[in-house]
């Protein structure tokens, strides 16, 4: 009887990870229609962050969670909020220059950046497998170049997507090496999103350059960005990590770029070359193998890939 309950609980955890990861891959589904309506990426990010902040705030209120921060937490949250907002900006601006599905694949390399930065900055050991995975992933990213399909400015999009993954890796390392390491994920996300909302509002010239949402369709897409790839993804993936652990949840996270790619192809008429497909497979395989092998080899005093703390 105990085994049956355990199996049922594990199945539920895997299901949450699948749904949560697939939801995160829905970013292009809601962002691209807003771009087509003339809404600027900075405005899109403001609406996404503002609505998400409100929703997570309501969730915290319903659970009776505290909104108080210590001085150290406030400082750390401010710095991490800047990094978090920068990562989102890199990804959403990359959608303007390259296929959003391919941009999402590049963002998925953030665990490799975590390993590389931990080795370079904190002198943590890097295994041969990790080094080879980084080389394979870099070659895969090179194969994602769309110049062969007429996308002469795709290098700009690739640079933005790479910077998004790099910035997100720095954010993860910062969170896991600061007073925020033990902070409840919903509290951390609330303050990171709230700070990002302020940043994007400021970059919209304090609202003067913000593109208004002129139709119910636009509001629905903005709300969709906040609900599905942000709040729902956050809550479900966090819950799945508690049930099945960070390694299986990270591996299932491969559904994020796959979902984004599927949407790009099916909804927005994206085009992939054979070279692109090989690059995608190399990137995803390299990340999954590194996450799996590093977490298997991790010991109590070594640093495995941090749990994802995105929204």
Image: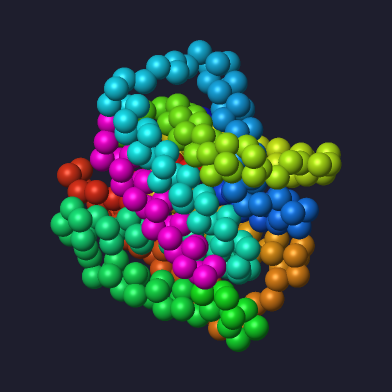
- Quarter of the image where one finds residue 104: bottom right
- Point 76% across, 41% down: residue: 213
- 120 over 147 or under it: above or below: above
The magenta stretch spans residue 21: no
What is the residue that sits farthest to the top in this orientation?
Answer: 64
- Quarter of the image where one finds residue 130: bottom left
- Point 34% across, 60% down: residue: 113
Q: In this image, 248 relative to 172: left or right?
A: right
Dominant secondary structure (helix, strand or loop) of the stretch shown in magenta: helix
Q: In this image, 222 relative to 256: left or right?
A: right
Rendering coords of residue 70 (x, y %): 31, 20
Q: Nearer the viewer, residue 129 or 57?
A: 57
The stretch in magenta equals 156-179
Q: Nearer the viewer, residue 106 or 198?
A: 198
Q: Is residue 188 visible?
A: yes
- 250 over 284 or under it: above or below: above
Rendering coords of residue 188 (x, y %): 43, 31
Q: In this image, 243 relative to 260: left or right?
A: left
Rendering coords of residue 205 (x, y %): 57, 41
- 126 over 149 or under it: above or below: above
- Point 78% across, 53% down: residue: 37
Rendering coords of residue 121 (x, y %): 20, 56
Q: Nearer the viewer, residue 43 or 261?
A: 43
Q: Count the marks: how many?
A: 0
Q: Is residue 15 visible?
A: no
- Quarter of the image where one finds residue 180: top left
């Amino acid at each position: 009887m105990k085994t049956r309950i355990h199996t049922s609980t594990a199945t539920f955890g895997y299901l949450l990870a699948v749904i949560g990861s697939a939801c995160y891959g829905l970013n292009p589904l809601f962002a691209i229609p807003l771009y087509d309506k003339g809404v600027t990426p900075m405005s899109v990010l403001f609406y996404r962050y503002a609505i998400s902040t409100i929703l997570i705030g309501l969730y915290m209120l319903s659970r009776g969670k505290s909104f108080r921060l210590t001085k150290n937490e406030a400082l750390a949250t401010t710095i991490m909020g800047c990094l978090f907002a920068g990562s989102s900006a890199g990804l959403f601006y990359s959608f303007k220059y390259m296929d959003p599905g391919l941009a999402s694949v590049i963002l998925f390399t953030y665990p490799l950046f975590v390993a590389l930065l931990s080795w370079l900055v904190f002198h943590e050991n890097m295994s041969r497998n990790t080094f080879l995975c980084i080389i394979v992933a870099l070659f895969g990213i090179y194969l994602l170049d769309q110049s062969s399909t007429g996308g002469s400015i795709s290098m700009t999009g690739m640079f933005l997507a790479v910077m998004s993954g790099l910035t997100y890796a720095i954010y993860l390392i910062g969170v896991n090496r600061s007073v925020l390491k033990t902070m409840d994920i919903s509290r951390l996300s609330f303050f990171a999103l709230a700070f990002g909302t302020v940043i994007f509002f400021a970059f919209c010239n304090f609202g003067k350059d913000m593109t208004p949402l002129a139709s119910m369709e636009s509001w629905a897409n903005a709300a969709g960005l906040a609900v599905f790839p942000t709040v729902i993804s956050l809550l479900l993936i966090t819950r799945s990590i508690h049930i099945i652990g960070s390694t299986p949840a990270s591996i299932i996270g491969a559904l994020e770029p796959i979902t984004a790619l599927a949407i790009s192809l099916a909804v927005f008429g994206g085009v992939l070359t054979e070279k692109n497909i090989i690059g995608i497979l190399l990137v995803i395989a390299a990340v999954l193998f590194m996450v799996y092998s590093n977490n298997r080899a991790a010991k109590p005093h070594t640093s495995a890939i941090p749990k994802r703390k995105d929204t």
